[in-house]
Amino acid sequence: MKNYTITVNGTVYDVVVEEGASTAAPAAAKAPAAPKPAVPAPKAPQAAAPKAAAGTAGSVRIEAGAAGKIFKLEAGVGQAVKKGDPIVVLEAMKMEIPVVAPQDGTVASVHVAVGDSVEAGALLATLN
């Protein structure tokens, strides 16, 4: 017998598969057992995202262009950036996509941490 853990649409199942069941009854004669949901694995604790203090968010919003996972933070709060400088690197479909500053400015806030999953349009950072 082999044990497998399978995830389907976010639900985790523990499945046991028997090998070489030559002495077992035909598969049609056995009632299929419904897989039992496994206890979801606890998520690893993530480092707290650097958040801006109240009232310090910038006026220029930097948003995710696609859904994905935060791969790398290229700029931090207080760092001066030029138009086109990468702020965050987003991983989507096994590609690294830099999210760049739309204009010159200073990073006012960062709203994500490495490893966070984000949807398209999610606020990643702000600039002053």
Image (cartoon, rainbow, N blue to C red):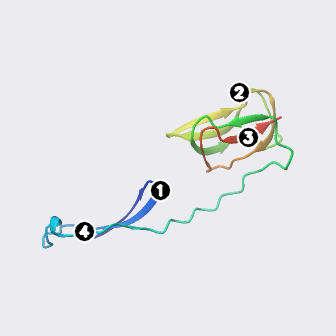
Dot 2 corresponds to which residue? 84
Disc 3/disc 4 C-alpha distance (Å): 51 Å
Viewer-side residue, 57 vs 95: 57
The earlier-in-sequence mark between 4 and 1 is: 1
**Mark number displayed over residue 10:** 1
Determine contact: label 4, label 1, CB under 8 Å: no
In this rendering, the label closer to the viewer, 2 or 4: 4
Residue 34 in the image, given as x and y percentages of width and height: 32, 67
Disc 2/disc 4 C-alpha distance (Å): 56 Å
Residue type highlighted by circle 2: Gly
Disc 3/disc 2 C-alpha distance (Å): 14 Å
Dot 4 corresponds to which residue? 18
Residue 69 in the image, given as x and y percentages of width and height: 58, 45
Q: What element carries label 3?
A: strand
Viewer-side residue, 60 vs 108: 60
Determine contact: label 2, label 4, CB under 8 Å: no
Quadrant assignment, res 124: top right
**Mark number displayed over residue 125:** 3
Other-residue count near label 4 (Cα within 10 Å), few / some / many at <14 / 14–19 / ≥20: few
Which residue is pictured at 81% across the width and 48% down the height? 52
Residue type highlighted by circle 3: Ala
Residue 6 in the image, given as x and y percentages of width and height: 39, 60
The earlier-in-sequence mark between 3 and 2 is: 2
The earlier-in-sequence mark between 1 and 3 is: 1
